[in-house]
Amino acid sequence: MNQIGLMEDPRNFSEVCIDAMSALVSHGHSFSDARLLAYYPYVRQNPYQKMLYASAFENGFAVTPLPSLDAVDSLSDRMQITLHYHWIHDVFKRVSRPREAKKAAKAFIEQIIRQKECGHRILWTLHNVLSHSAAFTEEEIWLRQKMADVSDVIHIMNPDTPKLVQTHYQLPASKVMHIPHPSYTNVYGDYISRAQARLELGLNEDNIAFLCFGSLVPYKGTRFFIQALDQLQERFQGRARLIIAGSKGKADFMEELYSIISGRSDIILYTDHVDDQALQIFFRATDVVACPYPVSLNSGVAMTAATFGKPMIVPEMLLPSFDTLSTGAVSFKAGDLDSCVHAANEAANIALCRAEAGGCVPEIATWAEERESLNISANFFKALREFNGGFDIANDTICASAAINQGVAL
Amino acid sequence: MSQIAIDDENGFAVYQPLSGFDQYLSALGLFGLFKTRRKLLIEDQAFKCVFFLKTLKPQYLNIKIATDGDEMVREAMHVRVKYFNWRMREIAGAHTFTRGRRGSRKRLSYFFADPFEKVKRQRLWLKPPEGAKFVVLTFERGDYGARLGFSSKIKLKVFDEGAGAKDLNTAFQKIMVSRDRMRMTWFVDRLKNEAMSFYQGETSYQGETSHQGAASYQGQAREIAGQQVQPIAMAHKMLSNMVYLWHGVEEKRSMMVIDDIAQIAQNGFTLGRHSSNQLTLEGADHINDLPDDMAAAGFEYSAVLTPTWDRAGLMSSQMRLEAMHLMRAVKEAGGRKITLREGRQFLARLMVAVAIVRQTGWQLVIDVSETLLSEHALGEWYRWRSLKDWLLQADTENIIDGNVHFLVRDHDQKKVLLEVTGLTKEQIDIHK
């Protein structure tokens, strides 16, 4: 299987790059303007990467996953590409001790430096301050600082990112490129009515439904929001419901979660992967989406909430991502239960007062439509091109071979 | 350290694998025939035993399952239960005791494996169907990750209904830790009967006032340890334990029923969360445009309109359906006035009628001449000695509305009603 998982791919990375160049030229781009971008790591279940690269071809970029870090070594010396790194804490995946983590981080940075020396451009998207389940904090901070130093461009989605990460590491201002998180408009299935979705989840019309969505892991603040639910029940006279939906996490956390919610009939727990077509049931049925995270720079769940026109509660640090949204994103002080309850109350009021019959708040949905992935993707590539400037990815050999393959006169 | 050494260390070595002879007996369904007390190391193959059923009374098999791990393993083993008649023909679909998360596999009963040092007794319950003479039990692994040891005296015991603690609290504490799903289910039924044996708003059978019974059921459920609490709170706690242990959908549903009725008892019944009428039926608005003489005709609401009233179901759902029927009935009667009379589900009907009136602005006359001092139940868990008691406990602000009038038999009833509600004299009429 290739990285995208569609089929068995017999090509090596070098061949994929040649094909990508040919495709760009046959798509009508001049060879000198054509760009290649390889990204790492490829994440199968999260559509984020597909969304970010949605308008690559239209903007003169061909995008392909990087099958492994050393795959770039197989490229010819004169073929330079943009290497886009996402969740770099993946380097700690197979290590169990700080010493090993340090070694892995160092090896990774050395590899990035080598790639840079070979003429490749390094682009890094900063998804989190630190990885959610950071086991090697010190090593990760070192890794991130080095990555910031080595990268040519640092892509941020939350405008306050440099300020929010500065207690751990510094981002050189000259390298920072701000392109917001795309919304999920036209990404997920969205054709089921609110009434049908609520019927499927067993919600009555008088229930105020809150949704905690995403993999069931300790750092998502699910337990924290369950505490908030107790207070919300007083406000809503027992009519509040909490839907928790997402893939199962580690056994010990799941056991803890089961023990907390087994006595609660006001909590609906769905512990499985929610596919792109089923997702609408949860977001359509709900009134307020809760993102009760203790730390969060960016949130796909919050953007999904916006896509479905739902008010949301987010931690204060996430709010700058929604600064252009006039209503619908209500912030709370991370870890402060009263603040969270207050925010949930306010968000519920927005849902009750401003939502249309279909349960969608028009201002939020319109805001999300403007951030549709094609628009954001186009902005991303335009900005990247400006950063790349006159950077030429192709050499004469590739140029000629592509031209011959495609029969295009250069 | 070798596996044998580990076994010796934690005592797991007492479990022995099935011998060739055991397997031969198992193939014939005769496992345990010659040696009833067994301690087996469970391997991948299942083993089978057949029992002759002397009686159709509930009976059980005690078993213990150990694991060499540190944590309890859920659904570590399961037992397939098949009943047969005299001619050894299977009686299909008979074993439904342990329906749960895997509802489609009703024949299976699931068991936990406990860490070796803390292994507890569990029970496989059998309730033979009519005509059953034999039962075949097939023991299989459910979890292939952990090492499992099985111990049992392979002999069925008949359930002694007289056994067990009589005192509710003692029985509750004992059954809570038993992990015996069947006994827990029976105990919840017992609690249901207990709940109906005393009145809300009065001194309870245990000497505690139960004014807050409905209101704080969840809080009480959390304060149970060592305290005397209401049956509904005990049932909630018991069911929540069952949901945790077996992830059972039926127990979850029973818990929802309890929460739902407690919610209604505490906060009353509403049709929708918005001020607009969520349940407006086609043409209901049109009723408001009727000329005054037609509007005054009204509807005599003296019986439940829903064809079947499921007492064990969610009360709020029943009441919603009743509300829809009532709105249609009022429309067909061509009026905008409801007169509520005594009859089945009086309290539920009262709440439904009030909810409708609050949303539509229609008139409601509640005839309490026969019901003010008579007993009332709400669902399977709440009972009041009289409507007066209920009015004392209920949030009457939800009931008293400019459009609601009461009809009483005499001045004494009027006086009582004035005492327990915030009604004005004009809102109470005496039967002519």
Image (spheres, rainbow, N blue to C red):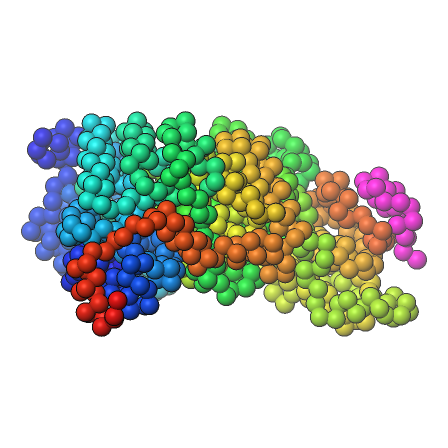
Q: Please give the name of the residue rendered at 32% of the width and 64% of the height, measured from the top-left corner.
A: A29
Q: Quadrant of residue B107?
A: bottom left
Residue B286 visible in the snapshot = yes
Would residue B424 be counted in the magenta stretch? Answer: yes
Q: Is residue B166 visible?
A: no
Q: Position of residue A209 (x, y in %)?
A: 56, 50
Give the side of residue A320 with respect to residue A103, left or right: right
Give percent across and percent down for residue A201: 50, 56
Q: Quadrant of the N terminus of chain B?
A: top left
Residue B334 or residue A192, whichever sits in front: A192
Query: Which of the 4 quarters of the picture holds residue A235?
Result: top right
Q: Is residue B16 left or right of residue A358?
A: left
Q: How many marks?
A: 0
B225 is higher (above) or lower (below) than B431: above
Q: Residue A120: x percent and y percent?
A: 24, 46
Residue A17 location (% of width, % of height): 22, 58
Q: Is residue B65 left or right of residue B419?
A: left
User: Which residue is at a point 44% across and 47% down the rendered structure image?
Assistant: A179
Q: State yes or no: residue B44 in magenta.
A: no
Magenta part of the chain: B410-432
Side (left or right) of A78 relative to A365:
left
- Foreground residue among B396 and A92: A92
Q: Foreground: A60 or A169?
A: A60
Q: Quadrant of the C terminus of chain B?
A: bottom right
Measuring 19% from the left and 31% from the top, which residue is drawn there? A103
Q: Residue visible at 50% across and 33% down?
A: A334
| Viewer-side residue, B283 vs B141 | B283
